[in-house]
Image (tube, grey):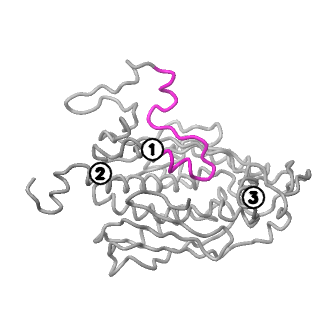
């Protein structure tokens, strides 16, 4: 499946070393001002080749909007966006065209489809995530109309954890670190592994503020369930935690429950979600990325015939997926929230009557 969402939905297309990647977005209400410069700014945060902490592949990631916009405003029809690939080096993959890279989707894609697109992983490449960032930017523009903001940052690199959480600092950090005290150590950890021709894992935090009560569609499209699907579907993500997450399993009801006062909740162990529905508190999510599987060390593997081989990679790869991955996580959470806003608009008869000026 290449489509995500119910009401605010999008379909993506393209491969890592193909002509282009792109997305078609449906469900954007007519009348939304589409700020193309803002969409490009979001893409610039994710684009490769920005600094020594990311892959050396240099792509401009310049987005072109092909439809669904008239005089800078959405028309209510599908919005088509395309990003042309300009810096592919497919020859870097010639030596692995018949073997499977350890830790990659090569093995499973080949056995599922019977075709081996060895050029950077083809459709399975994280290159596709640029389209999600473009769609997420549109979602953010819609959420902004309701005072909702989605923020993200890198919480840890390897074993170097952030001592403090500052989403404003993350906006200016080269690696989107959430902590000014830990940023340098996190940078050194990335470069240390890069120098050893290795990679390192990391974790990301996403926070959404300004949410109304009521987002989420029980029973099978709960807010936390949809977030889990959106984030676990990203390349390299191995775990997602909301609120206290796994720590809640070591706790008890008295300490994990969030007491309620007339002024609101007194804590937020739930991470802003109760029964799959937003409770008006900040949405708090932790996402955990594995180390980049593309490393420049000899690794044991097999070829398509099952013969033992040694995988020795060339090419350009991120030493830590979590850095640019944080931008993609932020975008996907924005997409989920935009979808939930549209779905929730018809949850009550009185809301529907207001749309049609009927007596409430």
Question: Mark 1 near mark 3, Cβ–Cβ under 8 Å?
Answer: no
Mark 2 Cα shell of 10 Å, populated few (<14), some (14-19), many (≥20)? some
Q: Quadrant of residue 182?
A: top right
Q: Does residue 61 show up magenta in the picture?
A: no
Which residue matches tag 1? Answer: 166
Q: Indicate which disc, 2 or 1, sits on the residue closer to the N terminus.
A: 1
| Residue of label 3 | 110
- Measured as percent of width and height from the top left, residue 34 is found at 36, 71
Name the secondary structure under disc 1. Answer: loop
Number of marks in picture:
3
Q: Which of these two is toward me, 213 or 217?
A: 217
Per the model, the C-alpha gap separating discs 2 and 1 is 31 Å
The answer to whether residue 227 is above or below residue 80 is above
Q: How far apart, in angstroms, are the residues tagged by discs 1 and 3?
A: 42 Å
Outermost bottom residue? 71
Q: Position of residue 339 (x, y in %)?
A: 38, 56
Of circles 2 and 1, which is in front?
A: 2
First to last magenta residue range: 228-251
Where residue 72 sits, quadrant-wise, is bottom left
- CA neighbours of label 1 inside 10 A, class few (<14), some (14 to 19), many (20+): some
Mark 3 residue crowding within 10 angstroms, few (<14) / some (14–19) / many (20+): some
Q: Which residue is mark 2?
A: 344
In which quadrant of the rendered image does the N terminus lie? bottom right
Q: Is residue 238 magenta?
A: yes
Q: Secondary structure at mark 2?
A: helix
Name which quarter of the figure residue 355 lies in: bottom left
């Amino acid at each position: 499946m290449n489509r995500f969402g119910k009401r605010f939905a999008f379909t993506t297309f393209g491969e890592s070393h193909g002509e282009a990647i792109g997305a078609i977005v449906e469900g954007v209400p007519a009348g939304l001002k589409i700020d193309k410069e803002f969409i490009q700014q979001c893409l610039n945060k994710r684009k490769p080749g920005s600094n020594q902490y990311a892959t050396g592949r240099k792509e401009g990631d310049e987005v072109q909007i092909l439809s669904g916009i008239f005089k800078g405003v959405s028309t209510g029809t599908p919005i088509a966006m395309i990003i042309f690939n300009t810096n592919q080096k497919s020859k870097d993959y010639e030596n692995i065209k018949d073997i499977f890279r350890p830790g990659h989707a090569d093995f499973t894609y080949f056995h599922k489809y019977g075709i081996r697109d060895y050029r950077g992983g083809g459709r399975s490449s994280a290159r596709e995530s640029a389209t999600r960032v473009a769609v997420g930017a549109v979602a953010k523009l819609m959420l902004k109309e309701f005072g909702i903001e989605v923020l993200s940052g890198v919480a840890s690199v390897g074993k170097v954890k952030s001592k403090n959480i500052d989403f404003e600092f993350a906006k200016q950090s080269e690696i989107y670190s959430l902590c000014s005290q830990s940023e340098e150590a996190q940078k050194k950890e990335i470069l240390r592994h890069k120098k050893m021709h290795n990679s390192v894992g990391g974790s990301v935090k996403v926070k959404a503020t300004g949410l109304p009560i009521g987002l989420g569609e029980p029973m099978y499209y709960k807010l936390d369930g949809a977030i889990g699907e959106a984030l676990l579907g990203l390349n390299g993500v191995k775990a997602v935690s909301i609120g206290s997450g796994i720590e809640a399993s070591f706790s008890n009801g008295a300490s994990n429950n969030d007491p309620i006062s007339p002024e609101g909740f007194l804590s937020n162990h739930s991470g802003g979600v109760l029964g799959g529905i937003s409770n008006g508190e900040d949405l708090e999510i932790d996402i955990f990325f594995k180390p980049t599987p593309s490393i420049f060390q000899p690794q044991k593997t097999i070829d398509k015939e099952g013969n033992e081989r040694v995988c020795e990679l060339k090419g350009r790869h991120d030493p830590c997926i979590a850095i640019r991955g944080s931008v993609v996580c932020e975008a996907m959470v924005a997409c989920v929230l935009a979808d939930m806003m549209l779905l929730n608009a018809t949850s009550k008869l009185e809301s529907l009557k207001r749309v049609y000026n009927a007596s409430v």
